[in-house]
Amino acid sequence: MTNLIAAGAFLTAAVYGQTVDQRRENQQDRVAQGIASGQLTSGETARIEGQEAGVNRQIHQDRVANGGTLTPAERQQVNREQNGMSGEIYADKHNANRTNYRGEVGVRQGIQQQRIAQGVRSGSLTAGETARLERTETGVNHEIRSERAQNGGTLTPQERGQVNRQQNRLSSQIYRDKHNAARQPK
């Protein structure tokens, strides 16, 4: 518990001065790294993705309501939520749960996360687009977790094919969203 408190204090100090969007991109990178290293299970990833999608929706709605910006109170609220997620990412990456993402499915999960993070960083993905992509990714992660649980930790060839098709659709959507005319307000 003491380590978790110390980690939270460190993480809060480390992100001091970052914008809301910089924090979102940083956390996307941390999740992608956790997927690639096997430190995050599909269940942990799905939970984190769901929380990120909720925060992204909130940011989008607040910006729409305020002409493209967040009020100081809204920034403070988002920062608290991001601090909580940051602590959860840290705890999940450092617990005993491990996943060995093998093959195309696992590799693509990490790549999708990196592409979304890059879109957040560059401003080519709006908060609304990011939230929608995160929800889709959460659904795919839930399906992977469920199917692996039913099959002793692996996916059947048919399930891998289905997940691959879903990841293809997500990849296409990431591309379309990153290359459309919508841009993230600064």
Image: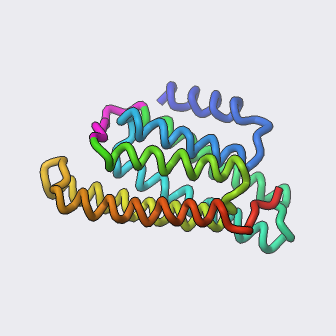
Q: Quadrant of residue 102?
A: top left
- Residue 54 visible in this rendered orientation of the protein: no
Q: Position of residue 110 (x, y in %)?
A: 44, 44
Location of the C terminus (image quadrant):
bottom right
The residue shown at (64%, 46%) is 25
Q: Quadrant of residue 151?
A: bottom left
- Residue 141 visible in this rendered orientation of the protein: yes
Q: Position of residue 180 (x, y in %)?
A: 68, 67
- Is 134 in front, or is 89? 134
The residue shown at (38%, 43%) is 107
Q: What segment is highlighted magenta in the picture?
A: 94-102
Q: Position of residue 53 (x, y in %)?
A: 56, 61
Q: Position of residue 169 (x, y in %)?
A: 43, 66
Eyeballing the image, is 33 above or below 168?
above
Eyeballing the image, is 96 above or below 163?
above
On the rendered structure, is 151 left or right of 140?
left
On the rendered structure, is 171 left or right of 29?
left
The residue shown at (66%, 52%) is 120
- Is 127 in front, or is 89? 127
